[in-house]
Amino acid sequence: LIENRVAAMENGVWTAGTHAPRGQGGAAGKVCIVNSPFGTIRGNVMHDNFRFGLYLDNQHPRHIKRDANGFVTDWASCAEFLPDGTDNGLRPANVIEDEFDYHNMFVGQYHMGDVAFVRYTSLNNAHSMYWKASKNFADGVSHHMKDCVFANDPSDSYGQLQVLGPSGPFTFRFTNNTFLGSPVGSAALNAGQHCGLVGAGGPCDVQYSLEGINWDGIDPQAQRIRFGINSVDAGMVLPIFLSKDDSLGGHKAMVSGHLRGFANVPGCQKLGSVWDNAIACESQIRRLNVWAGNIGIINITGPGYLPKEEMNMDRPVNGMDAGLMYYEDNFGTEVKGYG
């Protein structure tokens, strides 16, 4: 799919794998579409589409065993993990290269892993990127979004800057990306679109690893990050932002301001609205996941967590500031564990 131009459709290009996940017509029952690797996707332009420009739907490419006709010969090869527990995600990852989308309501996908965006440009879209759930790359080296530009011309009445990013128990690698223009929507970079809801990511303790991010092109008072967007309560409390350079204003880590005990940890401080009232720390902070069935509420203790008698049980905190961990199952639709 190389150097195509699509405009004025409901969706520009829609890889609707979930529409017929086991194929249709002569291929019915012979393919696993959602797990089939993409070919080359490069240099396409999508503009002025009613919903999505590029719409990759739900896609997790894997190492599928197929015959000369492309039909599956071993259905176990469509699975998320190999029998020995190895991640079956595609190595190297698929890459969406040099995509240019403008004047669309959305650009992106719902649930997608082992697919990277490189040199993507968003201009005056209502949502610069829309992504609900993802995972760590099986190849261990790819970045979810790298060398991308998110721009909005304020003289054009359509569009705003807002990346609605995914959630789940993984690290979202966001590297060498630039934000330009105005207005900024909910925030330039939002962690955890729809986290905890049906069909989205979870647990909500995703880590956003930022490197080489250029905020210089937006208003200095515009909100750069946001913890949770259209999510369950945990999505507003649990995400973490990390950086080893100046992408987070020189800070190494930021946790939600709802985790107020972290402000008492040496080297941590409360910030203002530009950083979503986060607590920024100069020490390393990482997510913790417990892989178990529903065994009730778990309580962890340690630096940054308040005594239970001081915890806030109002929403959205629900005692998470004292280390309470709740089982997440996306309203009974998936087994997610604790985060």
Image (cartoon, rainbow, N blue to C red):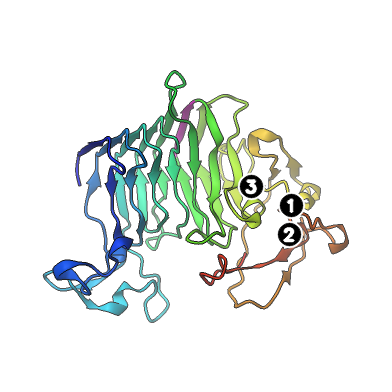
The span from disc 3 to disc 1 (Cα, nearest Å) is 13 Å
**Crowd around label 1: few <14 · some 14–19 · many ≥20 (10 Å):** many
Q: Are marks 1 and 2 in contact (CB under 8 Å)?
A: yes
Taking the spot 24% from the left edge, 47% from the top edge, the residue there is: 41
What residue did someone put label 2 on?
A: 320
Left/right placement of residue 23 relative to residue 54 reads: left
Where 12 sits versus 292, above or below?
Answer: above
**How far apart, in angstroms, are the residues tagged by discs 1 and 2?**
7 Å
Figure quadrant of residue 53: top left
Closer to the chain start, of discs 1 and 2, is 1
What amino acid type is highlighted by mark number 3?
Ala
Can residue 212 be seen by looking at this rendering?
no
Please give left or right for residue 187 compared with residue 147 in the image. Answer: right
Magenta span: predominant SS is strand
Of 85 and 53, nearer the camera is: 53
Magenta residues, start to end: 176-181
* Image: 238 above or below 216: below
In the displayed structure image, the side of residue 42 where residue 333 appears, left or right: right
Q: Give the residue at mark 1.
A: 259
Dot in front, 2 or 3: 2
- The furthest residue to the top: 155
Q: Is residue 144 left or right of residue 270?
A: left
Q: Secondary structure at mark 1?
A: loop
Residue 253, disc: 3
Where residue 186 appears, as percent x and y from the top left, is: 57, 37
